[in-house]
Image (cartoon, rainbow, N blue to C red):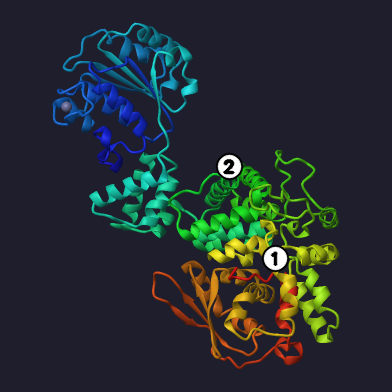
Amino acid sequence: MSLYRKYRPQTFEDVVGQEHVARTLRNALTAEPPRVAHAYLFTGPRGIGKTTNARLLAKCLNCSQGPTPTPCNQCDFCVRVAKNQPVMDLTEIDAASNTGVDNIREAIIDKVGMAPAEGRYRIYIIDEVHMLSNNAFNALLKTLEEPPAHAIFVLATTDSHKVPATITSRCQRFDFRRVTPPDIAKRLQYVASSEGMVLHADAAKLIARHADGALRDALTLLEQVSAFSGDEIGGPDVRLVLGGVPQELLFGMMDSVSAGDTRGALQFVENAVDEGASFGQLARDLTSYARDLLLQTVGFPLPADLSNEEHAAREHHAAAMGRAKLEGFLTLLRESEKEMRQSTDHRLLLELCLVRACEGHFTVASTQPAAQPQAPSAPRASWRDKMGIATPAATNPAPTPPTISAPTPVETPVAVPTPPPTRVEAVHIPAPTEEEAALEAEAVSMEEPEETHVEETVYAEVETPVAVQPVEEVPAEVVPVESYAPTEPERQDEPEVEVIPVPVQKPKKQGRRISNFDELIELWPAVLRRVRNKISIPAASYLVDATPLEFTNEQVVLQFSKEFHHAKATDALGRMPFEDVINTTLDKPRRLKFVLAAPEKKVEVVIEEEPEEEEDGLDSENNSDLVGYAQSVFGADIVGRSG
Ligand SMILES: [Zn+2]
């Protein structure tokens, strides 16, 4: 027997998520005399318990102890209903397959006059009642207008608006709700433990969310997953069965989109292939996540069942994207999903969607007003025009960016982690050595083209405001991919970070390389940028989850909070010169270690053994301002982690 059948509630107390219905029915049945209607209409999405409650109501009415709100579950009627066996006085009709008037006549009209065989009532449950033909409805209506005293109808439907008003007006109506994920998860845990299974919390959560409010689907899924993974079910099992997308991947993609990091976003698509995710699922999951974020930007509270990490990520992403951009992104996603139905090239569609989103081309969106009156400052518009970049829905009217002084240029570049230009030219460039110039050229060439240009273009306008800017200002969109880290301090500061700290710190930084832990923390974002530019965006994306843990004369230890990132980074160690690149920002070479934080024991990985190795020009003393240099090249936002 399926879990859904097996654990179908047999009393109102067992009903999950429809307490309002259960309570009303219970009260009516408890009344003296019981208030029993002749027709009930149960409406709501599929799989949430309409038929279950209809059968429960039937038991309450026809139980040998009834009418009662607490059927005995022992009398013949109760037992047969519970076991799903045919019962004389209970008729269930699936209107989806019995749409015609003849069906209704045969099953109901012709017999409704007959007295109940055993119980008090003759109960008719008509499922999917909206499927009935007009003639069938008319025939039914006649019966509903003058029902025999012993006849009770329970009409269930997912589409109540398709049921004629003449019918609904004769029914007592109950609106069933989607069951909330926490309620579903709780029920799943109950069922699992009754079945002797171990269901991990993350697995329960995943199933619950996937079920979208339908308890029946959740239990079906649980059954499916347990068939696959045995008696112990973890999140990865669920994902495998669902073809689901690891959360880290979703978060990474949203990081990329919010930072306008096209290459990063596409890299995550590539990673998704390794994870075995389907692109359709990926698009759906992104849609669902973006929708959650959108709700958040208009003030909906976050779901209660989030982990701290998820909580942080959502707040970060909602702020980083902003309402308008989310709207545009959602529209793009929806278009893609639509097209996916008619095409087999799901990957290409998803990639196109991401590229457009990263680059702010939300044109598909009919919702998008052509002009963006929002752009506050002239400069902003101008650089966009120059770049031919569509103005991203950018400015978030959302709660986040309130204090902003008008002309924050920073706010503009959705895609750009850019404020740095200022610094570059102002501070640094005065007397670039040839070597530096060469380096700069090199580094710059590694950047995505837009960024480079933007920096140059923006420079002049940016400078002033930057210097002045109070920390709060910067709107979310500016946050570069790399800077996302799940830790609180960071996520809170992030949006603001870019601009402000820069000017202040610049002078300080100049001519010095990281020589202690505090500096490492302080300059970590810049180091990340260096990794991005010197190695690759994916390389940096692996490190986004890392935070410096230790800094000694011999080594630098980075701690990862997520297994996913830790594994990716560790895996990349052999191929990518993380250590070399990071050493170029330090006062002297050190070994690099990755460890995984958290519940598990720390796993240590020694990255590379030869600490002494070469230095590239950057390390030599005459280029001592590496960090400043790096910052300026990378985007210069030095984020004070500590806030
Ligand atoms: Zn009974």
Q: Amino acid at mark 2?
A: Arg
**What residue sits 63% from the left and 71% below the top?**
640
Q: Is residue 560 left or right of residue 464?
A: left
Q: Residue furthest bottom?
A: 612
Residue 497: image quadrant is: bottom right
Report crowding for label 1: few under 14, some 14 to 19, many 20 or more residues within 10 A (C-alpha). many
Q: Amino acid at mark 1?
A: Glu
Question: Element under label 2?
Answer: loop
Q: Is residue 512 visible?
A: yes
Which label belongs to residue 498?
1
Question: Element under label 1?
Answer: loop
**Residue 156 appears at what percent x and percent y?**
38, 24
Q: Quadrant of the N terminus?
A: top left
**Residue 47 appears at what percent x and percent y?**
38, 36
Q: Nearer the viewer, residue 313 or 434?
A: 313
Which label belongs to residue 341?
2
Q: Nearer the viewer, residue 239 or 173?
A: 173
Q: Is residue 51 above or below residue 474?
A: above
Q: Is residue 339 above or below residue 532?
A: above
**What residue sits 68% from the left and 77% below the top?**
534
Q: Is residue 562 left or right of residue 116?
A: right
Q: Nearer the viewer, residue 326 or 302?
A: 302
Q: Nearer the viewer, mark 2 or mark 1?
A: 1
Q: Quadrant of ligand 1?
A: top left
**Residue 372 appears at what percent x and percent y?**
78, 45
Q: CA distance from mark 2 to mark 1?
A: 41 Å
